[in-house]
Image: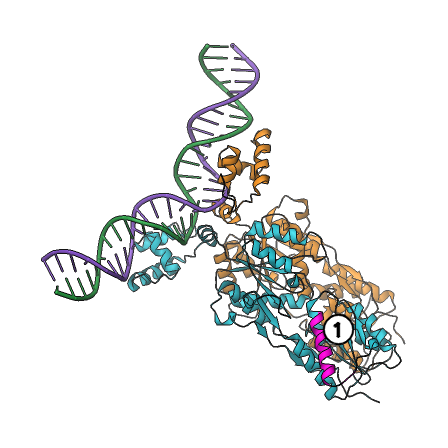
Chain colours: A cyan, B orange, C purple, D green
Amino acid sequence: MPDASQKPTINDVARVAGVSKKTVSRVINRSPLLKQETRTKVEGVIAELGYRPNPQARALAMGRNFLIGLLHDNPNAQTVLNFQVGVLDAIRDTEFALVVRPVDRRSPHMLDDIRSFLEIQRLFGVLILPPISENDDLARLCREMGCGYVRMGSARLDDDEHLVQSNDRECVESVIDHLVANGHRRIAIIKGPDGFRSAQERAEGFAAAMKKHGLEIPPEAIGSGNYRFDSGIVAAEKLLDTDNPPTAIFASNDEMAAGAFHAALARGIDVPAQLSVVGFDDSPIAAHILPPMTTVSWPIREMAKSAAFKLIEPTNPAAGLSTFPARLVVRNSVAAPRE
Amino acid sequence: MPDASQKPTINDVARVAGVSKKTVSRVINRSPLLKQETRTKVEGVIAELGYRPNPQARALAMGRNFLIGLLHDNPNAQTVLNFQVGVLDAIRDTEFALVVRPVDRRSPHMLDDIRSFLEIQRLFGVLILPPISENDDLARLCREMGCGYVRMGSARLDDDEHLVQSNDRECVESVIDHLVANGHRRIAIIKGPDGFRSAQERAEGFAAAMKKHGLEIPPEAIGSGNYRFDSGIVAAEKLLDTDNPPTAIFASNDEMAAGAFHAALARGIDVPAQLSVVGFDDSPIAAHILPPMTTVSWPIREMAKSAAFKLIEPTNPAAGLSTFPARLVVRNSVAAPRE
DNA sequence: GCGCATAACGACACCGGTGTCAAAGCTGTT
DNA sequence: AACAGCTTTGACACCGGTGTCGTTATGCGC
């Protein structure tokens, strides 16, 4: 008779059901070699007792565990959190759990820290968010350690099996199309930091789109920042202080775009009447700033879900998709230029 | 001879060191009953082999695991992420890992979902963030299930052992002091939603401070929202549309304060020249909005660290502290009222 | 009814640690 | 030298599952 004060174990279930623990194990693991009758009986006992297999014991016996790690270097809190929610969509009601590990990409020990983390926790696999997903040494480390991994990114960083990406580049083109359609011809960019693949993709998309429309990109129409608010202010000030200032600015992320709003306001330049601004990422600040910002949104939750499936259940159809479409979100920061 | 292709186990260490596995176990667990000589020898072998104890095996044998959970209902991404980083400060280089679990407080199944999560994962303990930390049923559930827990909050929700709080109430007083020192007397509040303990605390702090300064709070100077941006707009509009509108607004969080900015701008009211606004939480939007917002910052990372220690190592001095001081962050959204 | 292949199940070792308790080593006392 | 009492160590069972392989039902052809 199982002790009611303790959580029931597989032995309790086996005893009550009058079968061996191995049979119970088979029921848990959906083994096909069971008689339907037995399965039903055992399932009844499991339900009756409220039995749940102990993931630690399974992990030990099976030599693999049910922890999936999230490695990130917080570029944007909302993105990280949405990603977490997306992963959870995938692992809900499974025995998998999501272990988070913020890291510091500026630290020289980052790789060692991660190695140590992987050694201690022996994760089933890790999901890696940009910008550290762009670090090939990190991917190599995962392979070396026999740890599954999926990288999130905005470019082809790895083979499909290890990658979930969005088509940033094409979407930047739709941004420029939108601006041109509104009558803009002098369009400037605030690029992201060197070394970020996403920054590179967005800048290349910009260049390609401008070329497509037969528009010049004078050197003074190229600003750059580090993805932070303040750097957006500085970059926008430079752009606006030129002889022939742009009528529209595309910033490589929303934070910098918000900085551009600030710079404009400080000069008494109205957005969007006198200056159009478009951001990227659709972070909360884009919706909250005044006027609400036109930006590009990418399906982070869906991407997270797909990445999680790639790791834990590669046969799941949701794991097949590797490239997800970003889309333009039109709000109120773009208007026709006044001449 | 240990197989180099596999991770070494405690048996490998024992064999190489010429001791029993129990002795190795004692070294790992810092048992005091070991001869120094033996300890040194075993430690040498551990280092040589690069041995790491398997947390799953330990968890199984010890009947407790090394996973600490984070239950939250995303009120503010930055807060949640900072909290995660703070917890990590505490558990870095331990065998503990942080498992996140976003939940949906509006779902009728929230408690069942959490119960199921706890049953499956058998966490060492959970950390609960506001606003769901204010849910007493949830705390009861944890106790029932024998799962350790610590609640974060802005009020005395539980006994010290299970609580880390900030002194919101007093800090709201310092906000009002600041406004009064700047010459304001008609100060309005945008309260948070009913049922949120933090909202209640902040409102009570407001009332107490106003009383202290001998100021009236006419009913039309009390607005309320649901902590979201849009509700701040609506509430501020109502406050500004009264016969004798306030010269300053205290919003119970930054999102709603940003909404007040919006409402003011829409009416051509300059912040801070014609209207002062103060928020609460020091979320990123406070620093990014124009003008940068004066607000209240609370030491989330330190609180997280303390909460984690309370769970995993209650004897640690850092676990002792239960109340942390919030502080006023003066930026540019407060000025003297113009008459 | 018999032999045989196959389906269904169980006994037992094992995963990598920890807890219990007894044994071995050491010291000092008589 | 024998013994008590303490320190240090090891043998062995156990945590709660899974893998292997042998054993026992079951169905089928003749």
Quadrant in the rendering for residue B132: bottom right
Q: Is residue B224 above or below residue B308?
A: below
Callout 1: helix, strand or loop? helix
Residue at 76% across / 66% down in the picture? A226
| Residue A319 visible in the current orientation | yes
Give the image location of residue B218, x and y in percent: 77, 74
User: Residue B282 or A230: which is nearer the viewer?
Assistant: A230
Q: Which residues are magenta?
A: A199-216
Q: Mark 1, chain letter?
A: B
Give the image location of residue D23, x and y in percent: 24, 49
In the displayed structure, does residue B135 sit left or right of residue A35? right
Is B121 within the magenta? no
Secondary structure predominantly adopted by residues drawn in magenta: helix
Give the image location of residue A168, x and y in percent: 66, 75
Residue of label 1: B258
Q: Tell me the kind of residue under disc 1.
A: Ala
**Quadrant of the image for the C terminus of chain B?**
bottom right
| Residue B306 visible in the current orientation | no
Residue at 59% across / 75% down in the picture? A324
Give the image location of residue B201, x and y in percent: 70, 63
User: Residue B110 or A36: which is nearer the viewer?
Assistant: A36
What is the crowding at mark 1: few (fewer than 14 residues within 10 Å), some, or many (at least 20)? many
